[in-house]
Amino acid sequence: MANPIQYIYNEDHLRNSETTKFGEKDLKTGEMIINIGPQHPSTHGVLRLEVVTDGEMIVDVVPHIGYLHRCFEKHSESLPYNQIIPYVDRMDYLAAMNSEHAYAMGVERMLGIEKDIPKRVEYIRVLVAELNRLASHFVAIGTYGMDVGAMTSFFWMMRDREHILRLLEWICGARMLYNYIWVGGLYYDLPVGFEERCREFIQYLEPKVREMDKLLIENKIFVERTANVGVLPLDLAINYGVTGPMLRASGLNFDLRKVDGYSVYPEIDFDVPIGKGEMGTKGDCWDRTYVRMQECYQSIKIISQCLDQLQGAHKRTRDLNPKEMVPKKIRPKAQDLYVRAENPKGELGYYFRADGKTDQPFRCKARAPSFVNLSVISEIAKGGLIADLIAIIGSIDLVLGEVDR
Amino acid sequence: MSLKEIKDLINTHLPEMVREVISTTTPATFLVDSSRIVELCSFLRTEKQLYFDSLSCLTGLDNGPEKGIMEVVYTLYSIPYNYSLNIRCELDRTLPQIPSVSTVWRTADWHEREAFDLFGINFLNHPDLRRILLPTDWEGFPLLKDYSHQEKYHGITVKY
């Protein structure tokens, strides 16, 4: 009979399973180790930080990750390409549409059908990806406000995010983990009346974002709390491979939607906001939040252009089947492919190797933006105050599902 | 720059570095001498005509016990020239080791720790080579093709 008691507590288990990097003998006089997380609301998930402090000053920060490791890469080696999509959703669970979009694009590129996808399908993909980008940025900005002591921002942002999640639920039936973008097409066309409802929504949304901009970003208390905190210089950002709003906040105009011009982004007019150091130094926590807020306006602009196309030149027709191009059997030729796309957090990349003999990838590695962005934390937190560490974690905009995969 | 020009540029500065050019991959791949990888990477990063200033991705790969080869693939990207390149190194599966490039790009630090964690590839001269995703006392390297997990972990049955 199986033992009903699964686990017998032993104090050594704690020490052996995740040892701290620093021990007693590494510390100088007056220094001590403080452990933050993995269960702590301001670490945005199950992030554990080992902080070496001297009084209130931070001497070193060592992130311990892997508490949410779900073996994505091992699972994907024994699953057909189309069945990996739900796993992809669960990596960055705040922006599942964006992850799906990147993944589907990669497999389509391997199959060589990328150019054959109908225009309407591509516009719908961009539309839902941008809606999800808004939702992800809303969580980032809202919880960041709460991290530094502003309660209202969280409620307001969550209220508007809920609208987006309901729209996406209407499309595919799920609030957060969609499995909507398929390799070669979509699960289904937009529901009837979606375009009109969505246009109504973005007309409602823009003043709300503007209101938020005034309430939080330009708020004196918020500026004082975040300006000149956690400054990330551009050369350090590039050296650490930091991407997304964090890199743009450091002053580089680099957005893969513009640089690679994938999907229908070249046909859409939008700007790439960058940090200018208006309130403090370029690349500080304020700049990162500012860039995210500005990107919300740009996403709204993209959504409205997508809706123009979806109601105009690429209107719903009876004979369009979004599943038409979905291959019955997904078996790419033997090849390696690195595909990347701009996620709300940064550059999401997949490295595929197909062996040409099976329907499963031989290797599928995910290059998660949060994973890479987190690695810079010890550099930007060193020498600062412990209180600032919380502000820095929030400004990185982590999703631990993606860090640990 | 075309692929051939890059290859010639590398080979004039570092003789016999690029062994083979594989163009079936996207981006194209150079198969290189793994013992001199640090030399090559610092050249690629500093050379004015190439300037691969960012390491997008570092992938470990296991080809299984029959072939006996492990691979490390570096996906490089040059922001000013908007150009990508894969660098592939082949390692012996019985003793997988390769010099660390974390002195060239700091990105490599965590990516190499991940490859060490999941494949057991030993990155020589790495500043802090510890397991990153799995617990410190986990046995074996899960992404190996012939991996079988341990029976018990701290008294918990691993197989569910």
Image (tube, rainbow, N blue to C red):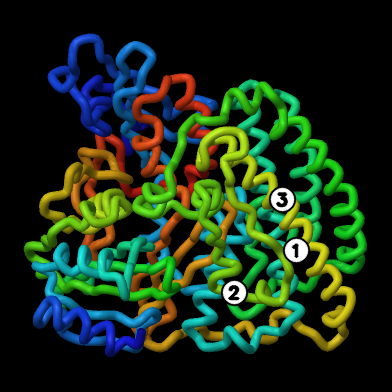
Q: Residue at x 43, y 20 (%)?
A: A386
State whether discs 1 and 2 lie on one chain: yes
Left or right for A187, reference B91: right
- Give me the disc on residue A296: 3
Q: Residue at x 53, y 54 (%)?
A: A244
Asked whether disc 3 touches disc 1, contact meaning CB atoms under 8 Å apart, the reply is no
Q: Quadrant of residue A195?
A: bottom right
The kind of secondary structure element at disc 3 is: helix
The kind of secondary structure element at disc 2 is: loop
- Residue marked by disc 1: A302
- Residue marked by disc 2: A261
The kind of secondary structure element at disc 1 is: helix
Q: Amino acid at mark 2?
A: Gly
User: Which of the marked residues, 3 or 2, is nearer the chain's N terminus?
Assistant: 2
- In x, y percent, where is residue A70? 42, 50
**Which residue is more in the foreground, A309 or A233?**
A233
Q: Residues within 10 Å of mark 1 (few under 14, many from 20)?
A: many
Asked whether disc 1 touches disc 2, contact meaning CB atoms under 8 Å apart, the reply is no
Q: Quadrant of the N terminus of chain B?
A: bottom left
Indicate whether A146 appears above or below A81. Answer: above
Q: Amino acid at mark 3?
A: Cys
User: Which of the marked residues, 1 or 2, is nearer the chain's N terminus?
Assistant: 2
Chain identity of mark 3? A
- In x, y percent, where is residue A293? 68, 45
